[in-house]
Image (cartoon, rainbow, N blue to C red):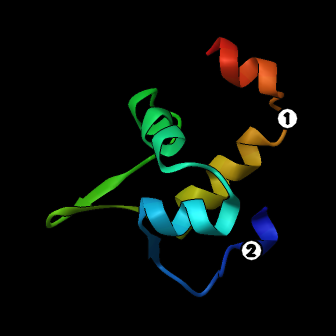
Amino acid sequence: MEENINRERLAWGFSEIAKATGLSVNFLRNEEKRGRLKVRPFGRRRLVLTEDLQAYLASSQGRTDSDVRAA
């Protein structure tokens, strides 16, 4: 998944992350609520900085589907 992340880009919206990673927007919103995905408000939008997205993806690599469901 991480290879799809453009490192020159500064920030991402949830729909853009979903398209690049295959994760659903609802899953990403839940990860934000759980405090696992750092999101920053910019006007009406909530964006994830590329560095925060990379850190999230790196920390999620060891999780299994059962870990995600149990959380």
Image location (x, y in percent) of residue 3: 81, 72
> In the picture shown, does residue 69 fall above or below 26?
above
- Say which element carries label 2: helix
Q: Secondary structure at mark 1?
A: loop
Residue neighbourhood size for the residue with mark 1, other residues' Cα within 10 Å, grouped as few (<14), some (14–19), many (≥20) = few
Percent x, y for residue 60? 73, 40
Indicate whether 52 appears above or below 50.
above
Quarter of the view holding residue 44: bottom left
Q: Nearer the viewer, residue 20 or 41?
A: 20
Residue 51 visible in the picture:
no
What residue sits right under mark 1 in the picture? 62
The residue at which mark 2 appears reads as: 4
Q: Residue at x 63, y 48 (%)?
A: 56
Q: Is residue 39 visible?
A: yes
The outermost residue toward the bottom is 8
- Seen at 80% across and 30% down, the residue is 63
Q: Quadrant of residue 53?
A: bottom right
